Amino acid sequence: MSMECSPSPAVFHVDLLCRKVWAALFGEHIQGIREEKGISIEEAARRAGMTVAEWVAIEAGRVPESWEQICAIAKGLKEKREAVASLVLLYAGAWEKDQYGRNLPGEIISEEYS
């Protein structure tokens, strides 16, 4: 009797899947704002100081890694940085938590706390 051994199913990472879903929603929201304002991908990328490929990646679900990138996205969309920052809070599940349980990009440090 011969026994065949099939490969084990891929490990399912719920946290990673959830982050990907939140990131996709963040990207779709950015795309929706851009399209609503009639801004082309090329124009948004230029205004943000990014390549077209970098902007496309954001709309596809690559989340910004720093406060500076959030501000650049805001410039690309002709929005106030607070508006894009509010999207970061809305889609906070897109960011991986650090050792302190924080899941937002970059450090925003106020003078009064430093």
Image (cartoon, rainbow, N blue to C red):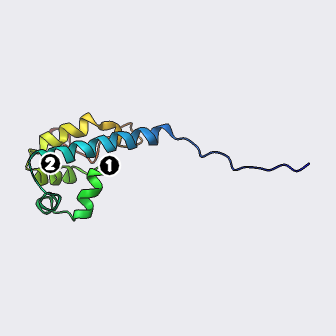
Visible in this render: residue 97? no
Residue at the spot of label 1: 61
Residue 47 in the image: x percent, y percent? 11, 60
Residue 17 in the image: x percent, y percent? 45, 41
Is disc 2 surrounded by few (<14), some (14 to 19) or many (20+) residues within 10 Å? few
N-term-proximal mark, 1 vs 2? 2
Can you tell which mark lies on residue 35?
2
Visible in this render: residue 114? yes
In the image, is 71 to the left or to the right of 28?
left
Residue at image location 8% in from the left, 47% down from the top: 37
Q: Secondary structure at mark 2?
A: helix
Which amino acid type is shown beneath numbered disc 1? Gly
Per the model, the C-alpha gap separating discs 1 and 2 is 16 Å
Residue 29 in the image: x percent, y percent? 22, 42
Which amino acid type is shown beneath numbered disc 2? Glu
Residue at image location 42% in from the left, 41% down from the top: 99
Q: Quadrant of the C terminus?
A: top left
Is disc 1 surrounded by few (<14), some (14 to 19) or many (20+) residues within 10 Å? many
Question: In which quarter of the view is residue 85 placed?
Answer: top left
Residue at the farthest right position: 1
Q: Nearer the viewer, residue 34 or 109?
A: 34
